[in-house]
Amino acid sequence: MARFVLRRILLALPALLGLVVLTFVLSRVIPGDPAATLAGDAATPAQIAEIRAQYGLDRPIWEQAIVHLRQVLTGDFGRSVFSGRPVVEEIAFRLPATLELTFAALLISTVLGVGLGLVAALDHNGPVDHLVRLLSVGGLAIASFWLAIMLQLVFSMELDWLPLRGRIDPTLGAPPDITGFLLLDTLLAGRLDLFWSALRHLVMPAVTLALPGLATIARFTRSGVLEALQKDYVLYARAAGYGRFRLAAIYVLRNAITVTVTQIGLLFGALISGAVAVEAVFDWPGLGTYAVQAILSSDYKALLAVTLVVGVVYAVVNVMVDVAQALIDPRVAEEMS
Amino acid sequence: MRISLRSALLAAAMLALAPAADSQSPAHAQAQQRPLVWGDNLPASLDPHALFDVPSQFVLLNVYDGLYRYQGNPPELVPWLAERHTVSEDGLTWEFTLRAGAKFHDGSAITAEDVVYSFKRLLAMNRAPAAAFRPVLRPENITARDERTVRFVLSEPYAPFLAAIPLVAIVNPRAIQPHVRGDDWGAEWLAANDAGSGAYRINPETYRPRNQLDLERFADHFMGWSHNQRPIDSVRVRPVLETSTRVLALMRGEIDATDSYLPTDQVERVDRNPRTRVARDESMRVFILRMNNRRPPFDNLDARLCFAYAFNYQGFNEIILKGLVIRNAGPNPNNLWGNPPDLRPYNFDLNLARQHCDRARAAGAPLGREIEIHVQTELEQTVQAAQMFQADLRRVGVNLKIVPNTWAGITSSTTRAETTPDMWVHWVSTYFVDPENWIGQMYDSRFHGTWKASSWYRNERVDDLLTRARTSLDRAERERLYQEATRIVVAESPDIWVYNTVNLRGLSRRLQGYRFSPVGSGGELRSMWLEN
Amino acid sequence: MSAALARLLRDPVSALGLVIVLFAVVVAVFAPYLAPYPEDAYESHLLQRLRPPSAEFPFGTDNLGRDILSRVILGTRNALVVAVSVVVAAMAIGIPVGLVAGWRDNWVSDVLMRLTDVFLAVPQLILALALGQLMRPGIETAMVALALTYWPFFARTVFAETRRLRGALFVDALAGIGARPTRILLLHVLPNALPAVLVRATIGMGFTILTAAILGFLGVGAAPPSPDWGLAVAEARQHLPEAWWFPTFPGLAILLLVLGFNLLGDGLRDAADPRLRRSRR
């Protein structure tokens, strides 16, 4: 097993290295000259050139690439061109916000997805089954930013049940900052009012983000349960007098774990992508809004770091998923070696 | 229509998650007055010498002080950290005398040496706010004559020098020095910290870039607080990124102030809401459609005139923007000096436009080609103007193509005429209150390569007039020179000037003492108080 | 294949998908004739801004007074053109890569698949955003960006199929009688991989429409005055909650078309090869 884990990690490394190079090439060709923007109004071309030299933007691109690679390997992502702050620090503020949102979405996807899949399987080819199937295909067809806006329109603007935007009610003051996960921090600080506010702010973004995952998990749970219900041991158990529902419930616990674990790896990329749109609509101060801001202001240092961080998180999740799968089902490990 | 939507929504809502009760909160909330929640954008950096844009003016005005400051509307230059200044006959030597007793947030006194340090830091960092000074001011020519006197010797006469002085924040070298790394002048530290003397101080603990900034009142501010019986002790800046969300957040009481560019469609709604109102203040911010005069067909006067007559000023200003802007005939805002009193704006006249276009075509101007207009995607007005223009130009046989872009993207392409787009849309705001900020830097060919001069207009007579206006200290003469230059420029129609902005800021009604000035757009917190 | 089609049509849900897609194609082809006000693709009517739905304007009008129904109809063509071009371009890159990498175990294969992994290691949207901004923003750029980020999925699919087939008896037999590898790959392996590619392509269409809409929404996709659906939703945002009809109908159009492709893709997968039922996306 240890060898499998090691091998899996080693496999991920070249991809990450490639990613560093790819993102660098990308970022250095983004339009917009950061030096021109920094120099500001009425700066003469000579002044802009001076700033370009100051940031090393005038060196040959391969030289910049080597410098960049060396910095990244030593954990130095540089400073945001615009704020002058270390990019790592800015990301550290924002990563927890995105992760909190993503975890909440995963939780919703799993719980509701497994539930719906189970119900659908038990009503195989019945009306509920068709409805769930339609829903699960629909869930993958809905544009996240549009759903987000529609939810805002209904639940915030018209009904006024949920907050429109942000992570927490600003009038309650700056939230405690321990881990960056607001739900956790507010509880640790014993501030139930803040916890409640954070929870209410999380509902709509998390639900929006959860929908595609929910749809996927529902599908797989459904087919998993259906398959299992036809297995010999289940037929035997049924003959022995176990009810369909009870069997499904026993089976589902095991199956749900396997399905979810398998899907998380795939879903995670979709979740992060979805988070960009959802964060933009709900004004969620996470990595998605940071990436969009970085692109809009041609802050190449920031963009490089975000892409890389997301890539690393993605790779780590995938390694973890593979390992978890191998633990659940040792055959996977054999197949992959 | 409304009622049926609502009832349909109510029914649909039954499916949704449990409604959460309003969080009229436990223990902590009502202990003291609710703080002010400011919803306008934060600058990328809190360092006042690193950036100069509208959001950074908020930090400059509240956390820092300058030697002089603009107050009121129309803006008046008033002595601030300096109590007076003198200028030599030749306009080269400027001496500022500091007020006695002014203190930084750490309690140390503000001295002439600190002012020298601040200007040297500004010039050494060479970022946006330095641009106005670099051509005329060298670091070694800034000196402290004594504790309270600073002397600047310019390399050439520069009339707008005083007008630009409020751009420069005086920073506390004793606060910065321990955090200097290499030759960065403490820039990394100051981007998230406070070295000022302003009416409010930053709480660096809770600062999150572009997202969250808490300010506390500085009771020992040198101007004192006698002008304000109930100043606001604690201000929370919580930017809301998207415009419509910002308006809704205001109307729901989540924030007390929006940015100052409320979409005109929202004004009526915000005014109608019992909790909120809109402050309308004529500013100095001109909306312009640029043309690249170096690139055919815009090197042809008739082609430019055709475009100038094809823009539906009335339709855009009065219908799309609901009359909440003021038609502006030339590059300088109407409410600034230096405009000819009888300057006539271009009007929308498709027949005239057609005639000019025909004449341009006859002269060989390539009006048949697709002409690109670059808009700033995140600013909807630039898109709307381009779309409306596109529809009208089609009627005179011109094909306009809209290209989405960003501020950073466009301004980096304007460094050379070949890469500057055919047309682009933007505003020129008040950086300092002087015609130099508009016509001076927009149409003098010495500024070619900067975004302000991106129409690449060149006229030797205009260059000469603007140069003389820049170096003369005689206000009456400058007035005359700018008027003449404006007349020539407007007749040659290098760009399309549309309107001067009326700043529209949504405010909660409990917020009182809001004082607008085109510099800073009313973001100065000193004068504000809250009613319950 | 016809048996598969019959199986497909017997399933009501996938038949529905086919109907939706065909409907969209018809609307796209005849858009200028079907739209009540076809000139509203670029025309603006300032005096009738933001009218609610009525008999005259069934979907209401937008911020420049244009008929939203007409723009939704005209936008169908854009959506389909984007989807088809992106998927075809992605196939053009992905299929050869998959075939070559799947055929032999050598360094070429390794390099190609590592490259695929690199592209797969960044979430597609972020990559597309960066690429879209990198070249000039616009619908063409968005299409290139989407194609450049979607090909790895085809590469993976074809790679897996090629790996499976290269050990098959008939391939060994062909190699035994001296057939050239290109011939085997193109004439024998590729056709066998086709069902999987077709399924992937159908789902890719829906996925592309969604991602293109997000790019349009974030301002790096289609440019005004294009009747692009994602762009319309973005333009609508600042007119909420009053103009609820403005984002609603373009959004529903996205939903319907993507739903059609997804249902069809599902049906195709089941019909073409039940074995594939478990792989998704």
Image (cartoon, rainbow, N blue to C red):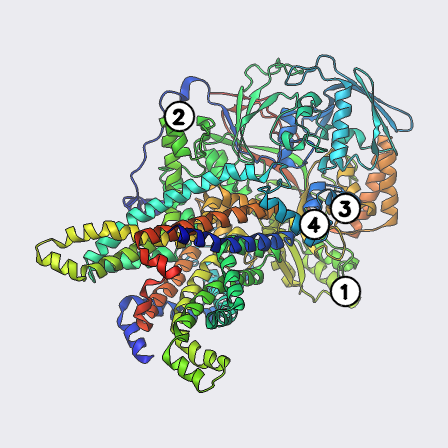
Mark 1 residue element: loop
Q: Which residue is mark 4?
A: B412
The numbered mark, 3 or 2, whose residue comes first in the sequence reads 3
Check residue A189 in the rendering and tell me which mark sits there, or answer none: 2
Alpha carbon distance from label 4 to label 3:
12 Å
Q: Which residue is mark 1?
A: B365
Where is residue B511? Give x, y as percent. Answer: 52, 25
Where is residue A45? Give x, y as percent. Answer: 78, 46
Q: Chain of mark 2?
A: A
Question: In this rendering, which labeled residue sits more in front, label 4 or label 1?
Answer: 4
Alpha carbon distance from label 4 to label 1:
27 Å
- Quarter of the image with the C terminus of chain A is bottom left
Mark 4 residue element: helix
Tell me if residue A212 can be seen: no
Q: How many marks?
A: 4
Residue C133 position by quadrant? bottom right
Out of C56 and A42, give the one closest to the viewer. A42
Question: Is residue B31 placed above or below C186 in the rendered structure?
Answer: above
Q: Chain of mark 1?
A: B
